[in-house]
Image: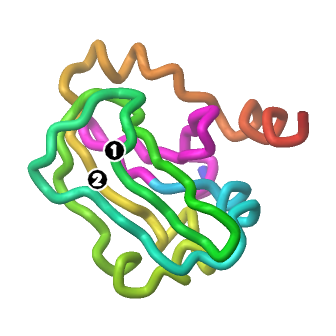
Amino acid sequence: MSEQAALKYTPEHEWVRIDGDQLTVGITAYAADKLGEVVFVDVPEAGTEVEKGRVVAEVESTKSVGEVYAPVDGTIIEANTAVADSPELINEAPEGDGWLFTMRVASPEALEAAGFIDAEAYAALTQA
């Protein structure tokens, strides 16, 4: 399975990589392309409690500001400080080194209820 095939997506143009009760979260290549040149990234601090659907990070470009939402309830484990220091990583590798944060899921039920979609469904969404 390719690295990208292992990703799941949200309708808000975020990707998640699931590893047990941990998620790595970033914005999709589609979102990065729509934003244009990223100039600033605000990532959450480790230890921050987050609620599904609430804004937890911001990605600012020369065109606009994109909000990143918590895909599930949980706790931030690590923020990718590299994107804060080098925002262009979002444009260069949005679904790789441009990840934003990792988090621990509050419960297995939260993960099951997240409603993530696969790459094929996400592609259809972005072409609609």
- Residue 124 lies left or right of residue 34; in this view the side is right
Q: Secondary structure at mark 2?
A: strand
Location of residue 105 (image quadrant): top left
Q: Nearer the viewer, residue 30 or 119?
A: 30
Q: Residues within 10 Å of mark 2 (few under 14, many from 20)?
A: many
Furthest residue in direction left, as rendered? 47
Residue at horizontal 89 percent and vertical 40 percent from the top = 127
Location of residue 73 (image quadrant): top left
Residue type, numbered disc 1: Leu
Q: Secondary structure at mark 1?
A: strand
Q: Quadrant of the C terminus?
A: top right
Residue at horizontal 20 percent and vertical 40 percent from the top = 104
Q: Residues within 10 Å of mark 1 (few under 14, many from 20)?
A: many
Q: Give above or below for 10 relative to 16.
A: above
Tag 1–tag 2 contact (CB < 8 Å): yes
Coordinates of residue 107 in the picture (x, y in percent): 20, 21
Q: Is residue 22 magenta?
A: yes
Coordinates of residue 85 in the picture (x, y in percent): 35, 85
Number of marks in picture: 2
